[in-house]
């Protein structure tokens, strides 16, 4: 008499490695497990620049498997999923110094986007026939440079360290700001204002019958501020604006042309530098949307291009002109005007350890050539070659 033996039943096991691989030696992973039995832990998989953090029951990596894994409650074939932690090598720390973004002219490449550090060329980006750096931001281990490039077409130029990022045709990047792990870029695409966060674009709120430009970005306490202006295609005046978390605030009332070029946040106060023009340009500083008068110094035209705040001191960089040919790079401190250089223009200001840095350029007496310059406490240092321009200064401590 014979009694048939019970046939053993198994569940099939699939191991989802999520980009990893089994070790070349010691691969002992099971492909099936006895129903009601236990599954042994295999040798851990490997993945370049990653640390293995265990096996999980679902693709969402929520419930971690403890081994030996009792499968008595399992009712079907199943898959286990590997979890990885990115361990890419960190960039070396960025050195302290004064970084300046702008444009230099070099042979045979022509106009080249350039970053100077402490008065010397630090990086140059040669891609097309014309390349301009508009802004630079230096974090603990990264340097971000943005601007514009032009070959057959033009587009925004955006670099994370030496890695070029792809941005749409007919775009331009005006300003960059890093906050935590996030990188923000302000600019425009075909006359529409945009903000990019980690290179994903966000169209900024607009107004009917108006185009726009985003000129400056600043992040404070997780709030994102963007300065810029709207310009009408139906004959209206330019409007200086500020976006806070993409909520549009009009700084000017539309009775005169107005533009905002720079935003800075200090504590609970928001400062925006720009200009109003009702026949002649007037430098304007808005503090919490209220206009603060800047000393005119007897000049016919003046423009505020950049603002920086330290404690109770407010620094504004810009330019002023009297008549047709007399113009100066200007620094206002607490609304008092100071001349930096004759036949020169200032574009950016930064303050660190009681030192005041202003970036801009000067021209020759015929105003046919420019030369990038930086002023430290009023003392000028020339940067670059003929036709060079400095647009942004950033101090890394």
Image (tube, grey):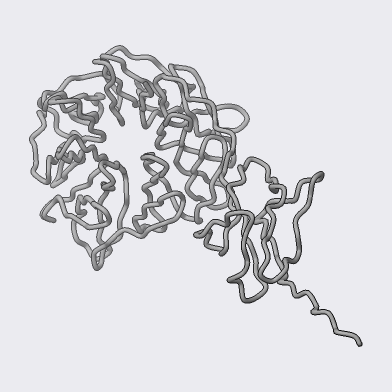
Q: Nearer the viewer, residue 220 or 204?
A: 220
Q: How far across and down, in percent of the image, does residue 85 sit? A: 56, 45
> What residue occupies the far bottom of the structure in this picture?
1
In the rendered image, residue 299, in percent from the top left (x then y), is placed at 14, 29
- Which residue in the rendered view is the most extreme toward the front? 1
Q: Is residue 172 above or below residue 122?
A: below
Q: Quadrant of residue 346?
A: top left
Quadrant housing the C terminus: top left
Q: Is residue 319 left or right of residue 75?
A: left
Q: Residue at x 38, y 49 (%)?
A: 187
Front in this rendered view, residue 296 or 140: 140
Q: x, y percentage for residue 184?
A: 38, 45
Query: Visible in this render: residue 356?
Result: yes
- Can residue 319 be seen here? The reply is no
Q: Is residue 385 left or right of residue 180?
A: right
Quadrant (top left/top right/bottom left/bottom right) for the N terminus: bottom right
**Horizontal and vertical percent position of residue 57:** 57, 63
Question: At 70% across and 65% down in the image, what residue appears?
Answer: 14
Report the front residue among 262 and 137: 137
- What residue is shown at x 52% (from left), y 62% (from top)? 60
Q: Is residue 331 left or right of residue 181?
A: left
Asked if 71 appears above or below 304 in the picture, the reply is: below
Please tell me whether residue 32 is drawn above or below residue 397 in the rendered image. Answer: below
């Amino acid at each position: 008499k014979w009694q048939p033996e019970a046939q053993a039943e198994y569940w099939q096991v699939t191991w989802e490695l999520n980009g990893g691989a089994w070790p070349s030696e010691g691969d002992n992973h099971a492909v099936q497990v006895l129903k009601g039995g236990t599954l042994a832990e295999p040798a851990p998989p490997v993945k370049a620049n990653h640390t293995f953090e265990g096996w999980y029951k679902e693709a969402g990596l929520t419930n971690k498997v403890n081994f030996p894994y009792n499968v008595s409650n399992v009712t079907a074939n199943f898959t286990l999923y590997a979890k990885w932690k990115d361990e890419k090598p960190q960039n070396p720390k960025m050195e302290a110094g004064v970084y300046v973004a702008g444009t230099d002219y070099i042979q045979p490449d022509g106009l080249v986007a350039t970053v100077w550090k402490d008065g010397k060329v630090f990086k140059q980006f040669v891609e097309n026939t014309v390349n301009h750096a508009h802004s630079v931001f230096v974090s603990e281990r990264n340097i971000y440079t943005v601007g514009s490039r032009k070959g057959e077409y033009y587009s925004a130029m955006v670099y994370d360290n030496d890695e070029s990022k792809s941005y749409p045709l007919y775009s331009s990047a005006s300003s960059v700001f890093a906050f935590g792990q996030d990188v923000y870029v302000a600019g425009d695409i075909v006359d529409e204002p945009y903000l990019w966060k980690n290179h994903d674009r966000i169209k900024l709120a607009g107004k009917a019958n108006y185009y726009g430009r985003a000129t400056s970005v600043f992040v404070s306490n997780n709030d994102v501020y963007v300065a810029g202006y709207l310009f009408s295609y139906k004959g209206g005046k330019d409007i200086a604006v500020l976006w806070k978390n993409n909520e549009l605030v009009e700084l000017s009332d539309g009775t005169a042309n107005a533009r905002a070029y720079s935003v800075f946040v200090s504590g609970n106060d928001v400062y925006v530098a720009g200009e109003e023009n009702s026949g002649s340009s007037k430098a304007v500083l808005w503090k919490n949307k209220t206009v603060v008068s800047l000393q005119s110094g007897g000049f016919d035209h003046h423009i505020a291009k950049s603002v920086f705040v330290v404690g109770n001191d407010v620094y504004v960089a810009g330019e002023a002109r009297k008549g047709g040919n007399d113009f100066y790079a200007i620094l206002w401190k607490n609304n008092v005007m100071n001349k930096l250089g004759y036949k020169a223009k200032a574009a950016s200001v930064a303050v660190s350890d009681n030192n005041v840095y202003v970036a801009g350029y000067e021209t020759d007496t015929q105003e046919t050539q420019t030369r990038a310059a930086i002023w430290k406490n009023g003392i000028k240092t020339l940067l670059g070659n003929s036709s060079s321009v400095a647009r942004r200064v950033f101090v890394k401590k």
